[in-house]
Each structure stands twice: as structure tokens, then as C-alpha cells.
Amino acid sequence: MGKRRISYFYDGDVGNFYYGQGHPMKPHRIRMTHSLLCSYGIYQKLDVFRPDPATFETLTTFHSDDYINFLKDIRPDNISNFGNSMQNFNVGEDCPVFDGLYEFCCISSGGSLAAASKLNLGEADIAINWMGGLHHAKKCEASGFCYTNDIVLAILELLNYHQRVLYVDIDIHHGDGVEEAFYTTDRVMTCSFHKYGEYFPGTGDIRDVGAGEGRYHALNFPLRDGIDDATYESIFAPVMTKVMEHFRPNIVVLQCGADSLTGDRLGCFNLTVKGHGRCLEFLKKFNVPILMLGGGGYTIRNVARCWAYETSVALDVELSNNIPYNPYIDYYGPDFLLHITPSNMPNHNTREYLDKVKIELFESLRQLDAAPSVQMKETPTTRIDKTAAIDAADPDIRLPDAISDGIVEANGEYYDNEKEGGDVRNHQSFKRQASPVLDGAKRPKEEDELVARMGEADEDKRQETGDRFYLRYYVGHKGKFGHEFLEFDFRPDGKLRYANNSNYKNDTLIRKECVVSKSVLNELKRIVMDSDILMEDDTKWPEPDRVGRQELEILIGDEHVSFTTSKIGSLMDIQDSEDADGLRCFYYLVQDLKCMVFSLMGLHFKIKPI
């Protein structure tokens, strides 16, 4: 199989929600996970999306209208008005009312729906939403810290395109909400490996196998305290092999609850991060699309470790065991390592007990009829449609962040790539790394390099018009918030592309593009020519450092130059330079270019996001 396409869904607002003082569920763990992905740099290998929040209409494809209306209306300051409803909908101690409750549900469920839609459209092989996996919520009530069941909603979306969906749950708690929702259908098989016996939610007996058409389509493996990596793998691999053989799913939904890790605040298993991740490694071998979701996990430093590692497993990327600096580095002390060691707790899962359970489950799977067929029907369109929202938007009102930030350019458009020509953000930097002799020198003017950067079609067009112009500017650094940068370029056809990634946007990448008139391009050329930048040389300018890097590339007429230097905070930074005059010329030109670009981008709120 070729390189897998991995889509990752994250909303920077999710970490702001707070269940309350002393409550074990902390959405902040998702922000910590995202921070690890950024600090390790593997987010650059993901297709990153900010999903649309779920709507009332999408939430009520499973949940009752009354229940969703209740979640929408209740707030901490009006609880007294909902006394009976709170009891009816099981909202109270375990599932408290907190500020932004409904928004939190919409964000969590929206991520899973968007991920399912991405898989349905064939635009990803694996889709990840660590904000989801809330498997206890029922049709008309909250349960186990879960209010809306994003997993059920996602599976319903997947069933629009796929005949059979396999749900696998490795949370320490039984996935009761998902099993209950699909207990009578043969198109969804639910498999849960969980702690059983006087443990929440108290369901998941081996004899619970489904009902009606869904008989033998619910599989439960009840486990005891202290199961370790080797023991877990010895049951997971053979059971899932039999499930794949008999059910033959078109797609797999994997709930990656991290409360099955050793040392979890509410757990009693003894799995390591690597042992937990082996479940994903095993399922990947079957080469079916996978939807990866979060779930439980209450020792939040280990949750972030686990989900960051499993993201790397999805990408087939090795992570260093030394956690890089990030805003939450203190959480990972005193060793600051990615991988955790198991405790010395006893393993009460004896070989005799596990073999007995496996034999019973294999017998149940043998009762399974042939994989169900589904009557041919027209494939419905996906529920996730951003273009409709953009077309319906008021042109005088800025698009919501969830829409503008959720539309992502092709992978690699503004990013570095390991291979020359593979969407390299800065082709000149790549050449300098390979050939130190060129460091500090201007870019050669050979026509071949120009064709490689601009494309043969654009080159033909420029030769026809005789109007050769291109400008690109980049400033950025890699720090505790990941890769922060500003980049824009003007193309010969008038297209202006703009990208900005700042910690002020919760690590959200903003991309926009517009087309400027010929008169604007002529004014830009005048600014460049009046600056005398074409007469300068960057040989004596400060080299890029930890503070930052700037790049400027200009093609105008027969002149083709590029400059690379460090980030300049103010004119004070220029005075001690060996070439103060040249650096000052560069500094003033960059300020003029930034002002022009910011003005163009601010002219109209409905500039096309890309």
C-alpha cells in the first residue's frame, strides 16, 4: 500500500471548556496533545482541519430533539429552571452543567462527523479526532462524562457510504452507548475490550451478543485488573483477526480511550503507551480506512503522550522518547519522556480465563451469517458542506473561524518538504543546505530554475506578454508554539496568496488568496524599484538564528534576486550590522510590502479562503 493520507481534526477552542473543580474529565488534555504534535513537528505531515461544529439537525440524527434542546438551553445560571429535566436527562454530578456545554458538544461531535465525511469522500485513509470518542452518551441522556455520542453520529454518517462498519473500543470502560445504538443491526459490529465487574457502566457481559438482525454483532471481552501489554496483545490480535475474517468491514472506527494506560486516575489496567498503540498498528495491517477517536483518560499527561504517539503510528513516523519543549513541558516531569513504564500491579487475567473467553467469542463469531449485503441505492451527499455556508455569507461580515480556518490548501503548499521539488516552501534554502558555497549569495538567474519554480505554463504566458514579475516574502521561526510564520507571494497573473500561522489563533493556520489588478502590480513594481533593493547583497547580513528567519525573492524583468537574513525587530538591530545601509533598505521595503498586503487583505472580508 502507498503512503497513507492522514487527516487530523482539531478546534483550538476545545481546551477552553471546564467541567468544574475536581472533575476528572479535562478537555485541556486535547490541547496538550495538539501541542505535542506541534512540538514534535509531525503536524506538518498531517492534513489539518478545523471542523464545523455539529448543528442541531446533525445531532438529532441520533439524539432526541427534547434532549438536544435541553443541552442547548441549560446554563449554570438557570439550572433551577430545569429540575425535573436534569433528572430525566441524567445531568448532574458525573455529567455537570458547565459554561459552554452545548458548544463543547457541537465541537466534539462536529470533529467526528467531519472526519467521517472525509473518509466517505475517499480523501483520507485515516482520519483522527481526539476531541471525540465519547462512547457512553445515550439517545436521550448523558452518561459517564459524555453528553452527545459523536461515535454513533459518525457511524451513521459512514453507513451512508459503507455497507459494514466495525467499531473497536479499547477504553477501559465498556462502550455501552455505541453498542446500545446498534444492538439490533447487522451492518455495525461493536467490539469492546473492557474492565468488567462492579465497574462503570456495569455492562459488557460476554453473553451480550446483540438482538434480532444484530445477533452475534456485539462482541464483548470482559477483562480483570492489571492486564499488561503482552497479555492484551495476546487477546486483541487473534480476536480481531477472526472479526475481520467473519465480518469483513469496509471501514473501522477505533475508540482510543487512554484510561486503559497504567497509572490512570480512574483506571486499573497496566498498559504502556506502546502497548496501547499496538492495537492501531495491528488494525492498519488490514488496509481498510480507519477513523481514530479519543475517549477516556484522566491522567492527562499520559493521555497526551498516548494520542501523540498513536498519531505518529498512523503516520508511520518514529518519535524521540525525549519530549521537546512545549508550553506544557512541566506536566511531563520529572523524566520528560514520551513513553511510560508499567507498574508492578498484579495481573489478574490468567491464561485459563482468557483462553476460555476467547473460545466462547470464537464460537459466537462462527454463528455469524455471511457479511450482510445492502440494497443498491443512490449515495447521499455528505452533510459537511462549507461551500454553501460561504456562498450564503454576508460579504460585509467576516466568515467564522470554523469555516475560514477549516478550508485547507493542498498539503505542502506552504510547508517544507524533505524532497527537492516536493512542494518545497523555499527552494533556495534547500539548495543552500545541499551546497554551502551558495550560502549568503544571491540566487542564480538561470532560466531553468525560474521554470521549475513558476511552472512551464506560467513561463509560456510570461514570454507571450513580456511582463515578468514575481515576489515572495517569508518571516518565521520555530519556537514553543510550533512553526509560527507569515508568508505571501504575488504571481505574474495577479494572484496574491497569503498564509499566517500564529499562536494568537491557537496554532490555527489561516490561508487566503485574491487577485489584484494590473495597476496594483505596477504600484508594487514601483515600490520595489524605488527601494534600490536590486542593488543590494545579503552576504554580510546576519544569518538566520533561533529568533527567526526572513526570506525575500524578487523577479522583475531580467533581474532575479533573493535575500535571506535573521528576523529584525527594529532599526536598532541594524546599526551594528556589517552592511547597515543594505539591511536598512531591506527593512524599509519589507515594511512597505507588509502594509500593502495587509491593506489588500483587509479590503474585503469575503476574500476566498484556501
Image (spheres, rainbow, N blue to C red):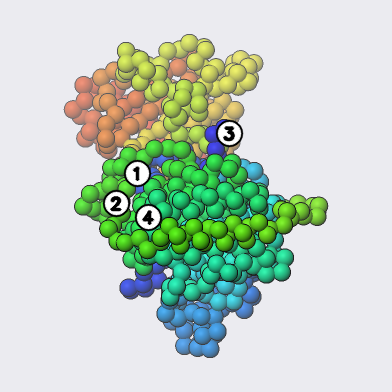
Where's residue 308, x and y in %?
40, 48
Q: Which mark is nearer the camera, 1 or 3?
A: 3
**Category of crowding for the residue at label 3, using alpha-carbon neighbours closer than 10 angstroms: few (below 14), some (14–19), many (at least 20):** few
Give the CA separation, mark 1 to mark 4.
Answer: 29 Å
Mark 4 sits on what residue? 228
**Given the image, on which type of amino acid does mark 3 rest?**
Met
Q: Is residue 505 positioned above or below 467 on the image?
A: below
* Circles 2, 3 touching at the beta carbon (< 8 Å): no
Is residue 369 among the parts visible in the rendering? yes
In the rendered image, the quadrant that contains the C terminus is top right
Q: Secondary structure at mark 2?
A: loop
Q: Which mark is nearer the camera, 3 or 4?
A: 4
Give the CA separation, mark 1 to mark 3.
Answer: 29 Å
**Category of crowding for the residue at label 4, using alpha-carbon neighbours closer than 10 angstroms: few (below 14), some (14–19), many (at least 20):** many
Where's residue 461, x and y in %?
63, 19
Mark 2 sits on what residue? 341
Where's residue 279, x and y in %?
48, 49
- N-terminal of the pair, mark 4 or mark 2, is 4
Give the CA separation, mark 3 to mark 4.
Answer: 31 Å
Q: Secondary structure at mark 3?
A: loop
Q: Nearer the viewer, residue 579 or 331?
A: 331
- N-terminal of the pair, mark 2 or mark 1, is 1
Count of labels in the image = 4
Mark 1 sits on what residue? 39
**Given the image, on which type of amino acid does mark 1 rest?**
Ser
Give the CA separation, mark 2 to mark 1.
Answer: 23 Å
Q: Secondary structure at mark 1?
A: helix
Q: Which mark is nearer the camera, 2 or 1?
A: 2
Mark 3 sits on what residue? 1
**Given the image, on which type of amino acid does mark 4 rest?**
Asp
User: Which residue corresponds to the image point at 39% horizontal and 37% vertical from the top-left?
Assistant: 318
Position of residue 60 in the picture relative to residue 601 (left or right):
right
